[in-house]
Image: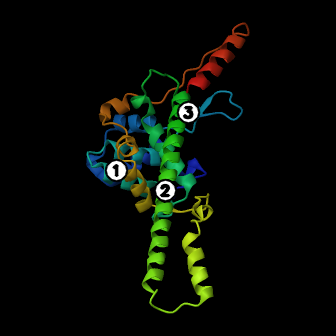
Amino acid sequence: MEKNRTDSSTTTISLENLRKCLETTFGSKAPSVELMEALHSRFRPLSVKQGGEGIESSGDMDIVDFLLGCNLLARSTQDKKIKLMFEICDDDDDGCMNPLAILQMLQRLERIFCRETARIDVESQIMLNNIADRRAEKNFHFIIMAIKGMGVKKAWKAKMKEQSKVSDNDSQALTPAQEKKAAADAKAPINLEALNIDEDYLITYREFMQALRSLKGTLYKTLMPRTMSFMDVLNSAPIEKTYEISDIAQDDFYMFRYEMNTIF
């Protein structure tokens, strides 16, 4: 099954296909039907209908979210979990992703257990997803700035190395024009525009990890959700309650929604 960043339908699986897959893989040791149904319900995505009128679900489980969830719940080291997360979200398995794919990976990471890790009691899964997306965007900007900082540092080291080569060759006779060019190159600033990270820039796993480790006191420790029990995860299936608002209270509701958006 191929993953597609722009079409989530290719990453979903029906309950029947999930059952067949697990029974084929594990045989008599396959999970019970009740557990399969609980897993399928837990990792079934909810989304706002087009136009914002109501909530809809594809009815299928998101297999990528399921794999990432299992990775996060596994008893493994932080580095191993981050590496497997990167590999799961790397569509073409080339060892690198563009910035948009990195952002979407971080959004998936934050959304999976946003209900369990929420600091406030929120029943709306859509609101929790919105909070998770904003947190992912903040982490994304930290990582991108760290990667750009590493690029500047690398360019500065290369410049210093080039200058040292010029100094080593001082014993060789240089023409006035060569001396002038060498002096100009030494004073020339680093081209920061060439180090900009645009949508076509490919970020390797090594760069991603180096960026996280440079943020070791903050993001490296908090990127992955805290340890949770498997039972707690199954008991917090994503839900979205529907409320009917009368015309009389409509203005109050719009004001409440505006205030909530400013908070989160």
Q: Which residue is mark 2?
A: 149
Q: Dot 3: what SS?
A: helix
Tell me if label 2 and label 1 are in contact, CB under 8 Å. Answer: no
Q: Dot 2: what SS?
A: helix
The disc placed on residue 130 is 3
* 2 or 3: tag closer to the N-terminus: 3
Q: Is residue 157 visible?
A: yes
Q: Dot 1: what SS?
A: helix
Where is residue 142 shown, x and y percent of the image? 49, 46
Where is residue 18 shown, x and y percent of the image? 42, 46
Residue occupying image coordinates x 66% and y 33%:
49
* Coloring basis for residues: rainbow
Q: Is residue 235 above or below residue 101?
A: above
Q: Residues within 10 Å of mark 3 (few under 14, many from 20)?
A: some
Q: Is residue 109 above or below residue 153?
A: above
Q: Is residue 75 above or below residue 227?
A: below
| Farthest-out residue, front | 176
The total number of labels drawn is: 3
Q: Is residue 12 visible?
A: no
Where is residue 189 shown, x and y percent of the image? 58, 65
34 and 263: which one is in front? 263
Q: Between label 2 and label 1, give the one nearer the viewer.
A: 2
